[in-house]
Structure formats: C-alpha cells, structure tokens
C-alpha cells in the first residue's frame, strides 16, 4: 500500500504540473565524487552487515523503492520550482545513510517515504549564505532522522521501527570496527574530515576510561564506543557540506558530537527510553552551529599549514591510524571487550556497582531469548531482586519475573519451574542453579552473538 500510495501521489503531482503547463525541465547530469564514493562505501557496509544479519538483504527491495521515490520526488520538486534538473548520485548516500540507522517495519513503511521526502525538501528549502553562496543547512539524511526520532520518542512508537535491532546487530560482523575504520579512509583523504572523526572517537574513549576508573563499569556496557555510534562518527555527522570549514572548528565539532552522544545516552537511559537515538538527535543542532563554531575557531589554527591539502589529509590520517591501532591493541575497540561477557556483569552486580544489576538482567534476558534455560532462571532471579531494590524502573513489578521463569521451565530447567511456583505462591524461597552444557555455547557468544571459539570462564 505504501508503494501504491507513493505512485499515486507522484502521478497526481505530475498531472498537476502538466495542467499548469509547466515547461519540461532541462536535465543536466553532474556526477560528484562525494556522492558516488559515499554511496559505494555505504552500500559495501550494508552488504557486509547483511551477510551476518539477513534482514538487511530482505530489506533490499525496499531500499530500491526508496531510491526510486527519492529520484521521483526530487525531479518533481525541481520541475515545480525551476526549468532545469540536476541528475546525480546524490540520492544514493541519503538513502543508504538513512537505512544504516533507521527503517520502519513494512506495515508502517509509508513513514519511510515521508522521512526521505522531509530530508530532500529541507535540502531544497532550508538554506543560508555560506562562504558567499547559497548552501543547505542540514545534512539531508541526519535531519529527517533527528525529526523522526523526536516524534518516535514523544509518541512511544519506537516499536514500529527496527532501530533497536539495527543498532545491536551492526556489532555482529567480525572485525567491524576495523571495517568501519577502513571504510572511512577514502572520504577522509578526499574531503578532509579526519579530524572530525578522530576527535569524536578520542573524546568518547577518554570519557569511557575515566568513567570506568571512577565506577568500575563501562558507560556503554559492552564497549567503549558502540558500533552504531562509531558508524555515526564516520558516516553520519561528517558530511563536509554541513560541517565547519576551519580545522580547529572541525576538531570542536567532533568533540561536541562525541560528548553529546554520551549526554544523550545518559539522558535517554535515565528516562527509560531507547538509547540508540543518542547519535541521531544532535546533528541538526550541530549543523545550525557550524558558522558560529568557525567564527570562534578562527582560521589561524591549522596543523601542518605549510602542507598542501592532500598532504595535510595524509598527515591527519596517519595520526588517526596510529590512534586506531592503539585503541585496537588495548581492546578499546574491537571484537573482544570484557563488558560483552556475563562474568564481568555478575561480579559488578554482586559488588553493588550502579547500573550493573539492570544490565546483567538485560544480558541474561537476551541469552534467555536465544534459548539458554539457565539465563532465563537468572533473568527471573535478577528481576525479583531489582523489584525489591527499586534500582530498575522497568522491573518494579515482581510479577514480571514470571515470563523468564516460565521460559526456562519450558526449556526443561527444573530450578526455573520451582521458582515459577514460588513466585505464584508468593513465597521468597527462590533458588539459583548452575548452567548446563546446553547453556554454554549460547553464553559464550557474548553480546556479539557470533563466536567461533567458546570463551573460557563464561559464568562463575
């Protein structure tokens, strides 16, 4: 129905223009490097991600539908306003970027078209004078993502999208941080955005290490930088057309993105809202601030001023490569992080560290959903404990322990059956039990899910 509705809209729009006797626009073909390069990089990332999460491939026909929608909308909008139309690859990075972060479920897919239309309309109408010429203010993919995110949060409608699954499954492919690092290099070389990405990553990592030193737990739980945030630091906020021009301004811009992601993650989590919006909400506000950031930064500060632009890009990229190598060697980024595993969070919970028990409950519930009966029983026990402590607003009702206990019982875990009966009787005699061989392969996956070797000391 969404496709038929879009087709009907375009037919009516086309008919109206013909009735108004608008002259058919002259078509000019302009192939800009930033468009087809970004499209190639984003498309390659989607192919790699889809190999480890099949819904991406299943979603491919709807991505094609969005591309057709984007071109039709852009052509008709251009025809409505002027006598020429520029045909380019510009729609590809807009659509690919949008779908790397958020898409609607099929029954709500007309909203995906509305999101695409909003981004392209903003690019056409919301403009300012920048460097002596008219330029669009907002990144045409991040602007609609932010607007739609606000609406979804305000209406509590996140479940009509696959946003949470997108954010979590992007961690599934092996060596994904390295892949993203390599994918960002061509754009960094050609468009000089290395300092933006590097400053965003470094500021987030520094905060993460300070937070761990003070609290003994990880701020983002299973990583210092979630993969979806790392992706945003490479391919979302780094659009050179809507970023600062000065080098110091770009460094500030990256720091602002990194620290605002941290602040939004904390704010959303404290309010009991989905936290994956943390890298989407702030970009339009940052776009609005770029000229002020440039004025504050000035033009005097440029590392390697005597170098030519491409030489300077190579110098920045070399520094970034060293930084990334250090982050990888110290497991700050990569496939193996202590926060992925059950033992770390069980110990942190036993030590009474803030937020540890709620996350341990979430982690056990995930493993329960994947078929671990022991994890189901532990998820139920943690729910009971959290309902009594009041630490987790989502688990204030003790009756919420019944589903994981029931699931564990259905999977044949006797302790879960006993605890389900205890819960029904209103007693307090809940009992844990050790995991079985059935549980170990599931628990060994960690939050990355795919593991070729079972990690030692999976549970204690």
Image (tube, grey):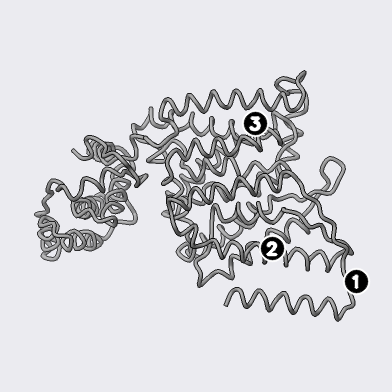
Tell me residue 250's x, y (percent). 68, 33
The residue located at (65%, 34%) in the rendering is: 188
For the C terminus, the image quarter is: top left
Label placed on residue 23: 1
Disc 2 secondary structure class? helix
Q: Is residue 381 above or below residue 197?
A: below
Category of crowding for the residue at label 2, using alpha-carbon neighbours closer than 10 angstroms: few (below 14), some (14–19), many (at least 20): many
For the N terminus, the image quarter is: bottom right
**Residue picked out by circle 3:** 251
The residue located at (46%, 59%) in the rendering is: 55
> Between disc 2 and disc 1, whose residue precedes?
1
As measured in the structure, the alpha-carbon distance from the residue carrying label 3 to the one carrying label 1 is: 47 Å
Asked whether residue 388 is in view, the answer is no
Disc 3 secondary structure class? helix
Tell me residue 295's x, y (percent). 76, 33
Q: Nearer the viewer, residue 328 or 44?
A: 44
Disc 1 secondary structure class? loop
Asked whether residue 113 is in view, the answer is yes
Res. 399 image quadrant: bottom left
> Between disc 3 and disc 2, whose residue precedes?
2
As measured in the structure, the alpha-carbon distance from the residue carrying label 3 to the one carrying label 2 is: 33 Å
């Amino acid at each position: 129905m969404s496709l038929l509705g879009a087709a009907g809209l375009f037919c009516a729009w086309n008919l109206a223009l013909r009735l108004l006797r608008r002259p058919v626009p002259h078509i000019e073909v302009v192939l800009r490097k930033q468009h087809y390069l970004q499209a190639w990089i984003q498309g390659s990332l989607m192919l790699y991600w889809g190999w480890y999460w099949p819904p991406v491939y299943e979603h491919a026909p709807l991505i094609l539908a969005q591309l057709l929608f984007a071109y039709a909308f852009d052509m008709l909008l251009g025809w409505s306003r002027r006598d020429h139309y520029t045909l380019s690859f510009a729609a590809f990075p807009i659509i690919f970027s949008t779908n790397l972060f958020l898409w609607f479920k099929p029954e709500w897919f007309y909203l995906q078209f509305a999101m695409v239309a909003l981004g392209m309309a903003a690019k056409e109408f919301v403009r300012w004078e920048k460097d002596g010429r008219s330029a669009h203010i907002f990144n045409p993919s991040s602007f609609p993502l932010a607007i739609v995110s606000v609406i979804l949060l305000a209406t509590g409608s996140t479940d009509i999208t696959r946003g949470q699954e997108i954010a979590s499954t992007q961690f599934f492919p092996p060596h994904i941080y390295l892949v993203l690092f390599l994918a960002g290099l061509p754009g960094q070389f050609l468009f000089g955005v290395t300092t933006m990405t590097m400053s965003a990553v470094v500021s987030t990592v520094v905060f993460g290490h300070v937070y761990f030193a003070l609290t003994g737990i990880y701020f983002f739980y299973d990583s210092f930088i979630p993969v979806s945030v790392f992706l945003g630091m490479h391919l979302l906020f780094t659009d050179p057309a809507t970023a600062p021009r000065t080098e110091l301004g770009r460094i500030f811009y990256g720091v602002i993105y990194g620290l605002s992601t941290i602040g939004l993650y904390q704010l959303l989590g404290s309010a009991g809202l989905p936290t994956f919006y943390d890298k989407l909400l702030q970009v339009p506000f940052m776009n609005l601030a770029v000229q002020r950031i440039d004025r504050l930064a000035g033009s005097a500060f440029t590392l390697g001023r005597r170098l030519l632009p491409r030489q300077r890009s190579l110098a920045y990229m070399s520094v970034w490569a060293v930084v990334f190598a250090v982050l990888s060697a110290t497991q700050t980024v990569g496939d193996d992080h202590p926060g992925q595993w059950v033992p770390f969070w069980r110990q942190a919970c036993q030590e009474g560290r803030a937020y540890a028990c709620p996350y341990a409950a979430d982690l056990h519930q995930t493993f329960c959903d994947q078929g671990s009966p022991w994890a189901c029983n532990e998820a139920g026990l943690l729910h009971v404990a959290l309902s009594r402590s009041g630490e987790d607003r989502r688990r204030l009702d003790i009756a919420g322990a019944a589903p994981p206990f029931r699931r564990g019982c259905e999977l044949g875990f006797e302790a879960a059956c006993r605890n389900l009966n205890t819960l029904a009787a209103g007693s307090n005699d809940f009992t844990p039990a050790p995991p079985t061989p059935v549980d170990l392969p599931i628990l060994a996956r960690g939050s990355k899910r795919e593991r070729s070797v079972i990690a030692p000391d999976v549970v204690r």
